[in-house]
Image (cartoon, grey):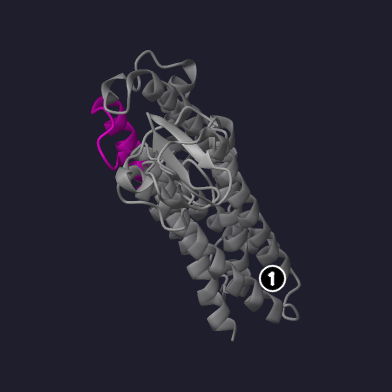
Amino acid sequence: MKNKFSKTIQVSILSVYLIFLAGAIVRMTGSGMGCPDWPKCFGYYIPPTSEEQITWKPNTLYEQGFIIIKENALFVAENDLKTGTLFNTKNWSEYTKHNYNTFNKYHTWTEYINRLVSVLAGFIFLFLIYGAFKQRKTDRRIPLLAFGAFFLMLFEAWLGKTVVDTNLTPAIITVHMVVGLIIIALLLGLKFIVSDNKNTFIFNSLFNKLLIISIIFSLTQVVMGTQVRQFIDEQVKLYGFENKNHSLMNPSFKFYFHRSFTIAIVLVNFGMLYLNQLKNLGYKLINWIVFFIFLEAITGILMYYAEIPMGTQAIHLLAGAILFGLQFYLWLQSRKVVST
């Protein structure tokens, strides 16, 4: 039973990282407003595949909440209705949440798949809390961590709606990212509790201090990265998604801080790698941490000097989330050594 629950935790962690990846692809492709409403998409549970499906037509049935395009504007059906030969403004309210008034099937379905991934993760989390409840007598921390992760997932769903309603407000997107990392931390804590963690590591005070610094640095870098992304989003609004060469034109101090701060992160983590090998501490995760730092640096360089090649944004964001998870789990391992 415990082994089965451990696999459920692993699947839950994977599902959250899939959400990170799907969200990164949405931002990478500029599909954040592919669906102007939430949780439906243009009023449909399964979104349209062509503009013709949402173009106003005479003598046609429409359900309340359906969104149509007419004369380059979006309108929402006030009630269930059947149109006549002429467009009756009394039956429709103009969509005014933001100035979104276009339809792109690729953007729409990219955003819709992102939502489906989140829904799938929600069902996985239901199995997680069911398994955690059955394990409550084994360790009281298990249901607490599982229910905490589940409620934060619900909070993330609400944030997702808020992101759409506020036309991709950067501050909310930042919170969205940070809460996702907290969920990862809770799930990894859960995994650590139910795993057979044999103490094969050697305690080193300097290594532990560097590890805590590295986690703080990574969180700082993630927050600064979302701020840089905010600047890029503003540039995209000004110059258009197709003009990627303007995305980092005249960047702010936050960009230079984000870029230069990578040096500090590299030094701290390479210091951990050196200590681990020199003292033979036994922390194998540090090798993976260094790999993902390298991946982060390479994708960051490509985004700046190669005008954000397709895929680099998604890899950069996902690698950052995985890096935090590895560092946090390494901290759990080192903490176990200290407490024994």
Q: Is residue 257 magenta?
A: no
Residue 137, how many percent across, how many down? Answer: 76, 81
Residue span colored magenta: 291-314
Residue 225, how many percent across, how many down? Answer: 47, 32
Residue 309, how many percent across, how many down? Answer: 25, 35
Left or right, 21 with respect to 66, comes to left
User: Picture quarter containing residue 229?
Assistant: top left
Decide which of 191, 65 is in the foreground and name it. Answer: 65
User: Picture quarter containing residue 87?
Assistant: top left
The single residue placed furthest to the top in the displayed view is 250
Residue 148, how many percent across, how many down? Answer: 69, 60
Write down the residue under mark 1.
142
| Quadrant of the snapshot with the N terminus | bottom right
| Quadrant of the snapshot with the C terminus | bottom right
**Residue located 55% across and 58% down the image:** 329
**Residue located 42% across and 58% down the image:** 46
**Residue located 26% across and 22% down the image:** 245
Q: Secondary structure at mark 1?
A: helix
Pointer 1 local density, CA inside 10 Å: few below 14, some 14–19, many at least 20: many
Q: Decide whether the magenta segment is chiefly helix, strand or loop.
A: helix
Left or right, 108 with respect to 200, comes to left
* Amino acid on which the number 1 mark rests in the picture: Ile
